[in-house]
Image: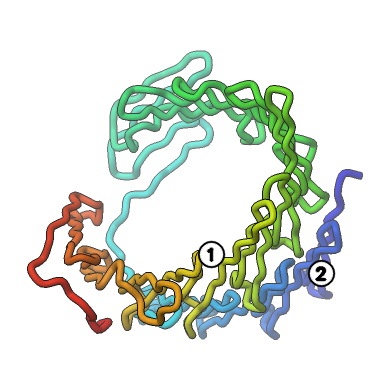
Amino acid sequence: MIARTEFRYDRLRRLEAVVHPESIIRRVERDPLGRPVREVLADGLVITRRFDAGWQLARLDHGARVFEWLRDRQGRLSAIGQGAGRPVPIDHPVLSRLVSDHSSQKLAWAGHPSPTMRSSGPGAETQPTGSLPLGLLIVSPALVQMDADGRTTETRFDDLGRVIEERSAQRGVRQVFHDARGHPVKMVLPDGSLELREFDAAGRLLFREQAAAGTRIGTRFLWTGMRLVGLDHPEHDLRATHDEAGRLRRLTHRLGVQSIHYDFSYDGASRLSERSLGDGMRLRYEYDAAGRPHRLGLVLPDRTEPVWLVESVEYQAGDAVSERLGGGVRALRRFDGEGRLASLGRHRVARPLRDPAPG
């Protein structure tokens, strides 16, 4: 037997637990109506859900993060809220949809001309040019991407959709071999070196060996449930400590005989508020009333007040369009009518903003 995963159901044939190999268990709890209102994941993280009168998902608590879905009188999604920030409104224009015709292996944008497509197999055909994103040329059985200089990268897949080979005009050839469970256990890299990987029955990466020119380097990965908590390398070790909400609290990096600690702090909305850099300095993060990033400061050793690297951020339609940086430099961004970044610019203001109030 390669691996065994057990699915457990209640008397009404509803899933209530998944028992993975290595005694990793995921549990599902339901309300009297059968809706999954609470899940305990394999790493101990708890997810709770709340539904509205129309049985639609209204709130999801994912550890310390909170998501809310607001709907109008017609039941359509009108806004999405996350944490303490202002909910993001949702518009309902007529959107173009990507339609995939699996029988003919072609792609098309609904309401637009057919894009340029061709197959790398026998009987390759070319379709009329349309609105396909630049660089995507081949759909099946291989995908080819082309950069602005005309250099191509071809990715080939097996019958199960797994990557088995990548040919790049710039980087060379990379081959991937899978085991019976579909895990990528061997890779032949463009420089001729090998990378070998070992997985456990639960699919967790346990060991990686990199071999090149007679040298072998092994890295071991450590897990708590499905959460990666450390790695052991001949030259350095890494350990991660999480709190009950699953948030990263400390990262310890050992280099030889020296250990460097990185600590992480969070505000009441579970947003990163401060992190240490390992050398006595700290980065401090501040947010505006809508929960958006507003200021970024560097706290020097033995100091309490930061030097502001970003003194303020201005937003328009949800996009950060202006930043006042330290030294009186202002960075500007301009977006086009479709929300795409159109230009970047910087200039020095006459009077640098010293201590703005968030808002």
- Identify whether 47 is placed above or below 159: below
Mark 1, residues whose alpha carbon is within 10 Å: few (<14), some, or many (≥20)? some
Residue shown at 76%/72% (left/top)? 27
Residue drawn 37% across the image and 20% down it: 126
User: Residue 262 sits in which quadrant?
Assistant: bottom right
Label 1 sits on residue: 278
Q: Residue furthest left?
A: 350
**Looking at this view, is 95 or 136 the one in front?**
136
Quadrant where the N terminus is found in the figure: top right
Look at the numbered disc 1 and give the secondary structure of its residue: loop
Q: Looking at the image, which residue is at 7% across and 68% down? A: 350
Q: How many marks?
A: 2
Q: Describe residue 219's horizontal placement relative to residue 58 as left or right.
A: right
- Give SS at disc 2: strand
- Which amino acid, mark 1? Gly
Q: Which residue is mark 2?
A: 9
Question: Quick one: label 2 or label 1, which is nearer the N terminus?
Answer: 2
Q: Position of residue 326 (x, y in %)?
A: 24, 66
Q: Does any portion of residue 36 appear in the rendered image? A: no
Q: Viewer-proximal residue, 329 or 21?
A: 329
Residue type at mark 2: give it: Tyr
Residue 245, horizontal then vertical, whole percent: 62, 77
Q: For the C terminus, give its image quadrant.
A: bottom left
Position above or below: 175 against 328: above
Relative placement, left or right, of 349 versus 102 is left
Residue neighbourhood size for the residue with mark 2, other residues' Cα within 10 Å, grouped as few (<14), some (14–19), many (≥20): few
Image mark for residue 195 = none
Which of the two discs, 2 and 1, sits closer to the camera?
A: 1
Image-quadrant location for residue 110: top left
